[in-house]
Amino acid sequence: MSAARRVLLGAALAVLAIIAAMALVPGLIAPADPLQTDVRAALEAPSAAHWFGTDQSGRDVFSRVVHGAGRSVGIGLLATALALVAGLVLGALSGIAPRGVDAAAMRVNDVLMAFPEFLVALVVVAVLGPGPVNVAIAVTLAAVPVYVRLARVQTRTLVLAEHVEAARILGVPRARAFTRHVAPGVLGTLSVLATIGIGSSILAVAGLSFLGLGPTEPVPEWGLMLAGGRNTLGTAWWIAVFPGLAITLTVVSATVVGRTLRARLEGRVA
């Protein structure tokens, strides 16, 4: 790995560490109440008193960005974890299923993969209705086909591996051989993909919230904050810019880390 890539990876890890702290202990980083309004302090520019300025209701934008990390990142992480588990189960079952069942399942999966993930999530939310829980479900369902495809390929590869064949020859039951020798390998590969997918999920959650389909006011959430400041960019740019930067830095950092892990897994120089 080159020095420049090491620096980039280090910066990405540092950003993710800060975001994690914001999500886990927001009160230590921004003790101000993110819901506290003060009409007299509305639309104040960034200053020593309010690092990221204030919004239309006089709420501290810095505090709202910090406290919003828990929801924005949390929903994205939850959706990615659920998609990974569902993809592992469905993909593994398809990989060991009879040829006809496997072919039919993959055709359905290919149809789902033909549509952009955000469009699928948008359709699911339109059917289920708005709300953070439905957003998590929608992003999960949109991401599952990618994990299913990879899990199926990895399962079919590992089932034919020499160590799995040796376990069968030694009399290890098929189910035990699968859980001990196949599933861990599939999970490891999917985990690397999930690292990259976290960024996509966070971006999808923010996009749905921006459209008013996620959490509602006055809940601090990055996508919702971005939507709230879109009409004041000319006079109060900080309302939208800072949550937008938080989304961008989180997604880019997660992608950098994920791509580095994938390059190492594939044996390439990151």
Image (spheres, rainbow, N blue to C red):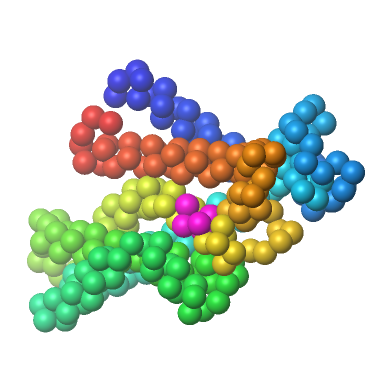
Rendered-image quadrant of the N terminus? top left
Give the magenta-colored segment's residue range. Answer: 203-207
Horizontal side of residue 33 vs 197, given as left or right? right
Looking at the image, which residue is at 23% across and 76% down?
108
Looking at the image, which residue is at 49% across and 72% down?
125
Residue 120 location (% of width, % of height): 38, 68
Residue 183 visible in the shown view? no
Looking at the image, which residue is at 17% across and 79% down?
104
Above or below, 180 against 24 in this view is below
User: Where on the picture, by quarter, is residue 166?
Assistant: bottom left
**Count of number-bearing discs:** 0
Rendered-image quadrant of the C terminus? top left
Residue 229 location (% of width, % of height): 65, 48
Horizontal side of residue 118 vs 103, given as left or right? right
Q: Is the magenta stretch mostly helix, strand or loop?
A: helix
Above or below, 40 against 227 in this view is above
Q: Which residue lies furthest to the right in this view?
A: 40
Looking at the image, which residue is at 49% across and 53% down?
202
User: Where on the picture, by quarter, is residue 246?
Assistant: top right
Return the residue nearer the eye: 246 or 77: 246
Residue 192 visible in the shown view? yes
Q: Does the magenta stretch include residue 66?
A: no
Horizontal side of residue 178 vs 24, given as left or right? left
Residue 3 location (% of width, % of height): 35, 18
Q: Residue furthest top?
A: 3
Above or below, 198 against 102 in this view is above
Residue 116 location (% of width, % of height): 33, 62
Horizontal side of residue 157 vs 51, given as left or right? left
Above or below, 128 against 217 in this view is below
Q: Does the magenta stretch include residue 205?
A: yes
